[in-house]
Amino acid sequence: MPALADGLKDEIEPTGKLRVAIAISPAGGAFWSTKTEAGYAGVPVDLGKAMAAQLGVPVEYVVHQNSGQITDAASKGTWDVTWLPKDPERETKMLFGPIYEVADATYIVKAGSAVTNFATLDQPGIKVAAVNATTTMRGAIAHLKHAKVTGYQTYDEIFGLLGSGEIEAFALSRDQLNKMAQKIPGTRVLDETFKKTVTAVAVPLGHSQALTFVTKFMTEAVTNGTLRKAYDDNGLKDAPIRTG
């Protein structure tokens, strides 16, 4: 790659490395990354590696527990690029490029539950779990007027509560809930969708040259197969790339 203009270099790799913000969970998927013996794996991990190679610099992964933490760090100068769910609140804290995933958010209900749809779920005394400080949790709180939504830090903890029947339901993207339903016999994923969550590339506020660069990178990644390969290599062979 030709030498970067100074302005772009200062925005996209000011430390001489490309610092990629990732969030770790056992779930994996188009946004979440996982910890492996060799380091990290996930769609953002592979995209970060490819972007760093194009820039001709090393990649460094900056690990967070969830997308809320990545958002909080956007103004601190600790990361250069990330891929995460986009919502109006986050658009005040970072600049977003192209969308590469659209996920339908819904609920899974525990084995033996009498809940069959959103109307029977949204009743006083019903406990619904979500991953804390995420766009899905904000969406569930806005959607449910009577049921109580509680945030938990980790996907693993919620998986355990659903399996033991301590919670009635869990709000997450349909593709991940379908996988969960296969692991916990008797659970059911509801047919309705309460929110569409879009995931996109992002850079810190004020980094307009970096935004132009990452936008071009993602547009090319869709057409040249880089994104498809990242999906396929991370257990998402059946998942379509949805750009809007």
Image (cartoon, grey):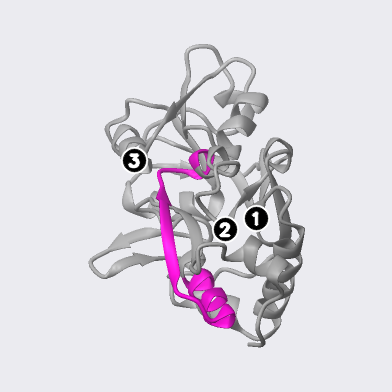
| Sequence-wise first label, 3 or 1 | 3
Task: Judge whether 244 appears above or below 89 on screen.
Answer: below
Q: Are marks 3 and 2 in contact (CB under 8 Å)?
A: no
Looking at the rendered image, the quarter that the N terminus falls into is: bottom right
Q: Confirm whether residue 102 shows in the render.
A: no
Q: Position of residue 123 (x, y in %)?
A: 56, 16
Q: Amino acid at mark 3?
A: Phe
Q: Is residue 60 magenta?
A: yes
Q: Position of residue 163 (x, y in %)?
A: 30, 37
Q: Is residue 181 left or right of residue 139?
A: left
Between 160 and 202, the one nearer to me in the picture: 202
Between 127 and 90, the one nearer to me in the picture: 90
C-alpha separation, residue under disc 3 versus residue under disc 2: 32 Å
Q: Tag on residue 159?
A: 3
C-alpha separation, residue under disc 3 versus residue under disc 1: 32 Å
Please give the residue where the numbered disc 1 appears in the rendered image. 203
Task: Judge whether 9 appears above or below 34 on screen.
Answer: below
Q: Is residue 187 left or right of residue 53?
A: left
C-alpha separation, residue under disc 1 versus residue under disc 2: 6 Å
Q: Amino acid at mark 1?
A: Val
Looking at the rendered image, the quarter that the C terminus falls into is: bottom right
Please give the residue where the numbered disc 2 appears in the rendered image. 80
Q: How many other residues sit within 10 Å of disc 1, few (<14), some (14-19) or many (≥20)?
A: many
Element marked by disc 2: loop
**Residue that lies at the very extreme toward the front in this rendered image:** 6
| Sequence-wise first label, 3 or 2 | 2
Between 35 and 241, the one nearer to me in the picture: 35
| Sequence-wise first label, 1 or 2 | 2
Element marked by disc 3: helix
The span picked out in magenta is 46-69
